[in-house]
Amino acid sequence: MTVTAQPIVSADRESALLASVPTGLLINGEWRPAVSGKTFDVEDPATGKVLLSIADAGPEDGKAALDAAAAAQESWAKVPARERGEILRRAFELVSERAEDFALLMTLEMGKPLAEARGEVTYGAEFLRWFSEEAVRAFGRYSVSPDGKSRLLVTK
């Protein structure tokens, strides 16, 4: 069995990747700073170097995000299950395409071995694939009531 060494990550690749990371809050489809203007530093645990400063969300930001989600829910509920599943499937594909980037970010932020980070990205992406397939499986249940005198029909 031949073991192929993974390529060493260059400083240029790290810099380019970090430059591509959004540092704001995604609320109502727009990237924005925290209402307070506060940020927090994300440090490389191996070096103590600040990688990025990220918006530090507070209660006002949480409320804005919740309000935006509630406002979008009615129209989202009207999206057919097949289409919602396709959106999740596309998300799975995009995460899989960028798996190396996500793994490297996890390694930089947490100090975890790159091989372990790759496994975690794969594991997490599988949830998107699973639920993309579940979106069209809105089954119900048919059973006898506890007293045995009627039948129960549950639909989702």
Image (cartoon, rainbow, N blue to C red):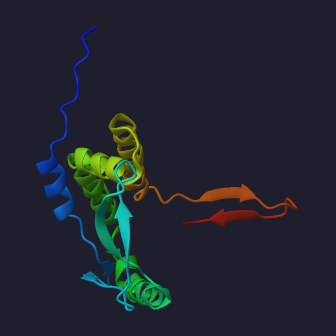
Which quadrant of the figure has residue 7? Answer: top left
- The residue closer to the viewer here, 25 or 42, is 42
Residue 63 in picture, x, y percent from top left: 47, 89
Question: Looking at the figure, which quarter contains the C terminus?
Answer: bottom right
Look at the picture and state if 15 lies above or below 111: below
Which residue is at a point 28% across and 57% down the rendered structure image?
Answer: 91
Residue 92 in picture, x, y percent from top left: 30, 52
- The residue closer to the viewer here, 138 or 34, is 34
The residue positioned farthest toward the top in the image shown:
1
Res. 58 in view: yes
Residue 127 in picture, x, y percent from top left: 42, 50
- The residue closer to the viewer here, 154 or 63, is 63
Residue 126 in picture, x, y percent from top left: 39, 46
Total tally of numbered discs in the picture: 0
Look at the picture and state if 56 lies above or below 146: below
Which residue is at a point 28% across and 66% down the rendered structure image?
Answer: 52
Would residue 52 appear left or right of 63 to someone viewing this image? left
Would residue 91 appear left or right of 132 to someone viewing this image? left
Which residue is at a point 15% across and 43% down the rendered structure image?
Answer: 10
Which residue is at a point 74% across and 62% down the rendered structure image?
Answer: 151
Res. 96 in view: no
Would residue 156 appear left or right of 3 to someone viewing this image? right
Question: Looking at the figure, which quarter contains the N terminus?
Answer: top left
Which quadrant of the figure has residue 18? Answer: bottom left
